[in-house]
Amino acid sequence: MAKDYPTVLYDVDGVVARITLNRPEKRNALNEELIAGLKEALRRANDEEDVRVVVVSGAGDDFCSGADLAALQKVASATIAENLEDARSLMELFMLIRELRMPVIAAVRGRALAGGFGLALACDMVLAGRSAQFGFPEVRIGFVPAMVMAILRRNTSEKRAFELLTLGTEIGADEAAAFGLVNRVLDDEAFDDEVDVFARQLERVSGSAVSLSKRLFYAGDAMTFNDALECGVDINVLARMSKDCQEGVKRFLDKQTKS
């Protein structure tokens, strides 16, 4: 990485890039350095030609407990301009995850709270250990999970989103899955292995097709139905012209001819 961020670990194993929040003594709480390290690691993964999927996890017992105490103390004394800069940095992280060409998976063990829950939801998919806990406790201290709200409302129903945002209570992995916030609930004992098996499924599909699908999937958020169909036409043509599609169609036709 261009700059050393000890609070973020980066490793590539075949098609999988692993990004690990590395502040276990602080429950991987978010601070300025950690957010900067995450953004740089994501950009690095995006530049790795062989990487098909990114897995974001937390070192130690928890995924991420939200902002750390020092960051909260800074908020209380910061100017409007300083708070704006700090908030925009987190916004840039959430946007970057969606702009990456490959899927980003949050692998959540332990607690994912406040901004940590937001980080997990910002990822394209969420895998959770059975004992994982999720919640937005911000309202208890008079704070608002404002940016996360845009993501949360796209992931669950309006009523359930409102409940999570205003009660400040925690929910378990099974309930989060029922809310549509978690893709899979995995056994704690085999969590790492099952995450790896899930992630490596993306090795067996077309990287360009997945990338185009991700681009279209999120672009449709701000479109009318007709505009989304028009955008779909453009992506459809791009997919048809890709090397992966042309080779895949040829293999399929050859197989049909031989059978």
Image (cartoon, rainbow, N blue to C red):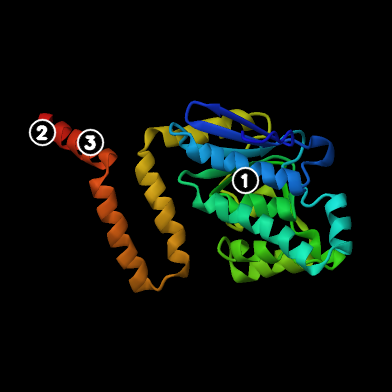
Task: Please tell me the numbered disc located at residue 247.
Answer: 3
Q: Can you give x and y, in whole percent of width and height, for residue 233 in the image?
A: 28, 61
The alpha-carbon separation of the residues under discs 1 and 2 comes to 48 Å
Q: Secondary structure at mark 2?
A: helix
Identify the residue position indicated by label 2 in the image. Answer: 257
Identify the residue position indicated by label 1 in the image. Answer: 39
Figure check: 32 above or below 10: below
Of pointers 1 and 2, the one earlier in the residue sequence:
1
Task: Please tell me the numbered disc located at residue 122.
Answer: none
Question: Mark 1 or 2, which is nearer the eye?
Answer: 1
Q: Residues within 10 Å of mark 3 (few under 14, many from 20)?
A: few
Question: Mark 2 or 3, which is nearer the eye?
Answer: 3
Q: Where, quadrant-wise, is the C terminus in this rendering?
A: top left
Identified at 76% across, 69% down, the residue is: 166
Q: Is residue 50 left or right of residue 174?
A: left
Q: Nearer the viewer, residue 21 or 203?
A: 21
Q: Where, quadrant-wise, is the N terminus in this rendering?
A: top right
Q: Can you give x and y, in whole percent of width and height, for residue 44 in the image?
A: 55, 38
Question: Mark 1 or 3, which is nearer the eye?
Answer: 1
Q: Can you give x and y, in whole percent of width and height, for residue 138 in the image?
A: 80, 62
Identified at 62% across, 62% down, the residue is: 152
Question: Quarter-wise, where is residue 185 in the image?
Answer: top right
Q: Nearer the viewer, residue 174 or 154?
A: 154
Of pointers 1 and 3, the one earlier in the residue sequence:
1
Of pointers 2 and 3, the one earlier in the residue sequence:
3
For badge 3, the amino acid type reads Glu
The mark total stands at: 3
Q: Residues within 10 Å of mark 2 (few under 14, many from 20)?
A: few
For badge 1, the amino acid type reads Lys
